Every structure is written in structure tokens, then in C-alpha cells.
Amino acid sequence: MSLPTPDVLRAVAMRLPRLPSAPASAGPIAVAVSGGADSIYLLCALWADEVVRPRLRVLHFDHRVRGEASAEAARFVDVLCAALGVPCVLGLREGEGAASEADLRTARDGFFAEQRMAIGFEILCTAHHLDDVVENALLRLARGAGLAGLAAPRALQEFRDGHRRWRPLIAAGLMKDDLLSALHAAGIPWREDATNILPIAARNRIRAWLAEGGKAALGTGYQAGFARSARIIGESQRALAQWARELGCVMVDGALPVAQLRGRPVALIQECLREFLYAHGIFDPSGPSLESLTAALGAGQDAQSAVRGLLVRVQGGCLSVLKNSPVYGQIERPLLIGVPDDECGLLAEVADVDEVRWASLSRGDISPTQEVYLVAPPGPLVWRGRVDGDRYQPLGSSGSAKLSDHLINRKIPATQREALPVVMAVGQILWVPGLPPAEFARLAGPTKGALRLTWLGPCLD
């Protein structure tokens, strides 16, 4: 479908249903537009509001994952914005090819932050809708997320740096089918992202699963029910956060006073813990990883525990992160498939490596320091701490060497080395975050049922 002339495009955009009013703010309103159906509908529906229209500024970030298709999407967004008379800023990722979702999100958020300083916007609009709420809830529930994670994505979300994310399609109660029907009826084109249908990402697999039987199993309009539940969860989380502030649990120089949590409900204690860990770069830790700290806070006792490579201590009524890293020792612990291990910060999953992903891995587009794909070993996975004398042969190396030498050569700080888990299978070292995986588990080509290991702890690059 080709882009209509500017006059026709503006005429059909004017006929789109109006979205809820924008939150009160001064200055421009930025709109994240990828070129897909969701963001194109969002832009056109916002443009239809004569009050909002002069304040719109479009931000498009080219992740450079899909080669020429990515570049074409950027050109399409630029031309469409010109036809609507909306200023557009195009951003470009430095790297090229496939990367982890976390790396892509970090690059995109960096671009948004740069433009917020340059343009001076307070509100950034994104095109999340009710189907996104469902997908998020299922993903987060499966990983044991807390209230803040289960409430996302919210219709309006405030960030510590002062900007707000506004998601008017959620506020309007719109589903993906609603957007597609409206765009088809209006003759407004968009660009499809072919990677959205590949079963590589967990979100894509959930989307396909729901498309096959979501309505039959849950009933028509189940998305609205998920959205209501997310709003209720969000209200509960905000109430707990307010209660914590009233008790004086407010971060000061990276530490959190917690004496007032003694004898309080577990839900309040865990909300404070999750907020504290979020401030230190740990997102959505699972309940089990917080149990010892939760018990200590509730009893007014001192304790310390490792959470994804950080050593967290409660002492004298104050919660803090110790500068020294946790030492795991040589006792082997099981690493379960599909369940994040929050003590060590590892996630093991079964993943299919198709031709596209294999090409990206072969080019080195995906950093092996945070995420690796391997031949699934025949036995169970375990992990432990580093032991003197550990040796292994990294991918592409002609022989084995001491693990300590590999860590030094990779310039991983000494303070982080003891906090890195050693993943093992069949008695051999399989991977250590920050290093390449073992040569013996090298993939030979596209593989179904490969093992994907992801490091959830602090960045090592």
C-alpha cells in the first residue's frame, strides 16, 4: 500500500476517533514512531486533535536489525511526517544486526534521553495497547514479577528523570484489531516488522499462542480484563509506595532507612526492597531471592544476601549495597530452565536458532558477554562460584587456560570477578558471564532446542 497524497492523508487522519486528552504539561509532546501499525495509528490519531497537533515531535530510532528493511521504515516515517507537517528526528543505532532485547532497549532509551535534552519534552508517547498489557502480564507472571512489573505498561508512567510516558491507546481501551481495522478503513499504510512473527523472542511466542486460542479460552475482550487487573495492581503498588514514604523509607545516598518496617506486612516490605534494588539497577527480582531480606526486615534483624551479583545488607535499620561482591563458593546449585536464578543472576532457556539468528551470531552481532546460544548439554545445568585452578577452552580458542587469566584479559574488574557465576554441565565449564562460551558447546548452524543463557546482573561490557 502506497502513502496517500498529503491532502488525502490529512483528510482520513482527521476522521480517526479522538484519543483521551493529553496530560497537563508544557512544551512539545514526543511520539515514538517505528513505522508499524500501532505507532502509525497513534501518530495519526494524535495529529487529528487540533490542540495537540502543533506540539507533536516524532522520534524514530532505527535499530539496524533488519538491514534495508530498517532503513526503509525510517524513510517511510520521515515521508509520512512531512506529509502531516510534523517535525521528525531520526536516530540510528551504532551497531548493526540482531542484538538482545535489553541491548536494543538501552540504545533506544539513550536516543530518547538525548532528544529530551535537545527538544525539551516532558511527555513521550508510545503505542502500547491492550494486547501489550496481556503479553506483559503473562511474561512477568511466569517470572515471578512484583506489583510494579505486573502493572506495566501503565497509561501514564512517571520516571525519576522527570519525564513521563503517556500511552493513550491503553487509556482509550484499544486492541490491536481495533487499530488494524481503522487503518485499513482509512487507507493509511504502515510497515510490517518481519521479526515480530519469528518465534525467537518469548513475547512473539506468547503473541502467536494467544492468536491461536486466546478468545476461545478466555472469551472475547479478555484484553480489557487484563487491563483492569493491571490498573488495580498499579493502584496497590502506589498505595504501598506512599505508605513507605510516610514511614520515612526514602532513599538517601543509595541507602534506605528501614527500621519502621519491623512488624509490617510482607507486601510493604517487598515493595520497599524492590524499589531499593531498582535504584541499584536490579529489575523485577523474584520473590524467593528476597525471602531472607524480607524476614530480617520484618523481624528488625540484621542480614545480608546476594541478589544478581550485588551483596545487599540490612544492618542497624538501614538497607545498603556492599562494595565487595558476593562469594558463592564451590557448592554446586541447580540452574533450572525458564526460571531466573536471582541469587546469581542467570536465566537459562530453550530457544530455536533460525537462519536469521544464526547469521547474526556468526557475525558477532550479539555480545557473548551477556547472552549466549549453545548446544543443549545432555545432563542438568548447575552453577557455582569460581574455584582456584578452574580452566576452560573459550569459543574459538585453540586450547584451555586458567579462568582467572581469561577474566583478567577481558579486563573485568577484580571487584566483579567473584560475583560471576560459573555455569557447568557434564562436569565442564559451559560459560561465565563476561567471557565467550565453551568451545565444546559451539553451535554448528541453525538449531532447534538450543540452550540460551542470559546474564541478568550488572553490565560487563
Image: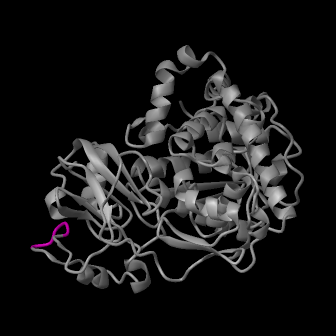
Q: Position of residue 196 (x, y in %)?
A: 46, 39
Number of numbered discs visible in the structure rendering: 0
Q: Is residue 190 above or below residue 360?
A: above
Residue 36 visible in the picture? no
Q: Position of residue 347 (x, y in %)?
A: 40, 54
**Left or right of 345, for residue 90:** right
Give the residue at the far left of this rendering.
Answer: 398
At x 69%, y 60%, the residue is 298
Q: Is residue 277 above or below residue 86?
A: below
Q: Is residue 334 above or below residue 179?
A: below
At x 56%, y 45%, the residue is 76
Q: Nearer the viewer, residue 287 or 97?
A: 287
Residue 57 found in image quarter:
bottom right
Tell me if residue 390 is in the magenta stretch: no
Tell me if residue 397 is in the magenta stretch: yes
**Left or right of 109, for residue 165:** right
**Span of residues in magenta:** 394-398
Q: Nearer the viewer, residue 181 or 176?
A: 176
At x 59%, y 74%, the residue is 313
Taken as a whole, is the magenta stretch helix, strand or loop? loop
